[in-house]
Image (cartoon, rainbow, N blue to C red):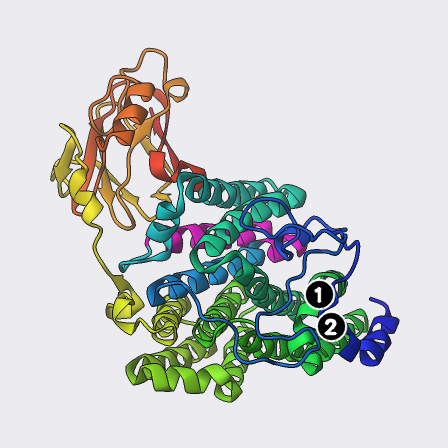
Amino acid sequence: MEQTRRTWLRATAAAMAGVGLAGCQGSDDEDATLTDGGEGNGEQQADGDGQNGEQQSESENGNGESDGPPAELDAAPEDVAIAAEWNAIRTRLRDPVILGHADLFDAGETVAAGIFERFETAAGDPNAHEALEEAGEEAYEGFEDGLGGLRDALAAGDLEAAHDEMKAADGHLREAQGATVGAERIKPLTLLVLGTHVEDAALLARIGEFGEAAHEFGHIGDTFAEKMQGMVAEVDADAAETVVEALDDAAAAAQAEDGGAATDSAAEAFDAATRSIYALVPEELAGAAHLAALQARGWDAAALARIDDSSAASIVQDTFAHFEEAQVHELLEEADHDSYEAFEDALEEYAGALDAGTGVDAAAERFATATLRAQFAVAGAPEAAPEVGPGGSENGSDDGEADLEGGPNVVAGVPDDADHVVEMQAVAFEPAELTVQQGDTVAWRHAAGEPHSVTALADGVPADATYWAAGGFESEDAAREGWENGRGAVQSGEAYVHTFETAGEHEYVCIPHEAAGMVGTVVVE
């Protein structure tokens, strides 16, 4: 990053109000996820004078002076909360890519799988999963395909492909956000994605990847200057200047291999970005999106705990300190005191789990769910939030499951004569590979998540084997068609049972979660 950018901002911040940056084009493959200048996906097109499509805030008169609060939202409170939750997911999509930058592809793949699992098991009505499905088949399937592709790319150690798949998944969530709360809200929401991504870059500094951290800080700073700075300066010139200065300082600190200074500067940039959102969008959306950013910070801690548990707790402690001083603190306390207490309790327990090094995953889930409830509360719909069950899980039911059926080989519970049991988790078979003897019976038990299928691949079983699948289908094509019609489902409390008579490798998939990598193999000896 050039030091001259800071000097330029100080000299011209006031004059920037209402002025877009001409000819700004993303130079890095991630720019498309941080700007509203691209085609499709709910994005705003560049304006006619060749500027980069930045929108004048609805609360501004063009001279940087406020005419009042941003225009009211034409969206139900629960839809506002869902749009904010999609922002949390958008932000979290960057975590596995950041880990890939540190050559921690296995950890990145695990994080990507965790994103998919939480999305698939979202409870409550409405929730992020069902709302995206209702937004349209293209958005829903495109997001799931992108997320599954992200996991596959990380498994293959392909960082470029991981960027591409992350961008694809992000784009479909942006499209849904635009349809839900208005296309003009996408850019302010993306500001918080960018602001939280600054903290992702700080994660690299925390684990000693200073070169990668400096690169990320520099790239984020360039993107902010080109795509976001004018919008922020219109409503809060001090915040715009702080973001630029803090990112310059963070990059310099990373280059000097000063991790503490880099993380401190990243926190300054994050604080300024979250502060400015309240002047850009209505308060209920700003508060919900702000909380979603804090949820994303919690997931950062979980990701860091997988590779360096010595400093993960400090992320949660810093998040707590940020919350105590933030505008959203008062908003949440006034909106719903129970949600406020649950949020702070979950945050404290999460910090304790990280300090102790035990129960981290459960604490992370509980904090995420408490934050989601807080998002609904601030949005104005506390009664629509999912209930929190024991251990932080979300309670909820999917009435759509009543329309599904299993078939002749899907039974209640696990039969006593089963020789082996495969647990079907939210997006994984456990174990993914199982070795059995001819004549052994295997039961696949639904253990978590939405309904699953157990579907053999036509070209993945021995040539002389009889085709097998939940639902009793005679071919893979029939099984896939059956799934589309609600047949062959293994639901909560059920198991699919099959006895193997033909030696060799039998490969199979869960049709609805195949893109997430839910595949398995039975080796028959």
Q: Are marks 1 and 2 in contact (CB under 8 Å)?
A: yes
Q: Residue at x 59, y 61 (%)?
A: 187
Instruction: Identify the residue position indicated by label 1 in the image.
Output: 224
Image spot of residue 455 (x, y percent): 31, 29
Name the residue type under label 1. Phe
Q: Secondary structure at mark 2?
A: helix
> In the image shown, does 145 or 277 lie closer to the viewer?
277
Image spot of residue 68 (x, y percent): 54, 80
Label 1, label 2: how far apart the Cα atoms are: 10 Å
Name which quarter of the figure residue 49 lies in: bottom right
Q: As displayed, is residue 321 above or below residue 358?
A: below
In the rendered image, the residue lying farthest to the right is: 4
Please give the range of residues in magenta.
Answer: 97-121
Query: Left or right: where does residue 243 sit relative to residue 323?
Result: right
Residue 197 colored magenta? no
Label 2 Cα neighbours within 10 Å, binned few <14 / some 14-19 / many ≥20: many
Name which quarter of the figure residue 361 lies in: bottom left
Q: Quadrant of the N terminus?
A: bottom right
Mark 1 or mark 2, earlier in chain: 1
Query: Left or right: where does residue 154 sit relative to residue 283?
Result: right
Work out whether residue 510 can be spotted. no
Name the residue type under label 2. Leu
Residue 280, labelled with which disc? none
Q: As displayed, is residue 518 above or below residue 117?
A: above
Q: How many marks?
A: 2
Q: Would you say the magenta stretch is mainly helix, strand or loop?
A: helix
Residue 107 colored magenta? yes
Instruction: Identify the residue position indicated by label 2 in the image.
Output: 247
Q: Quadrant of the C terminus?
A: top left
Q: As displayed, is residue 98 above or below residue 329?
A: above
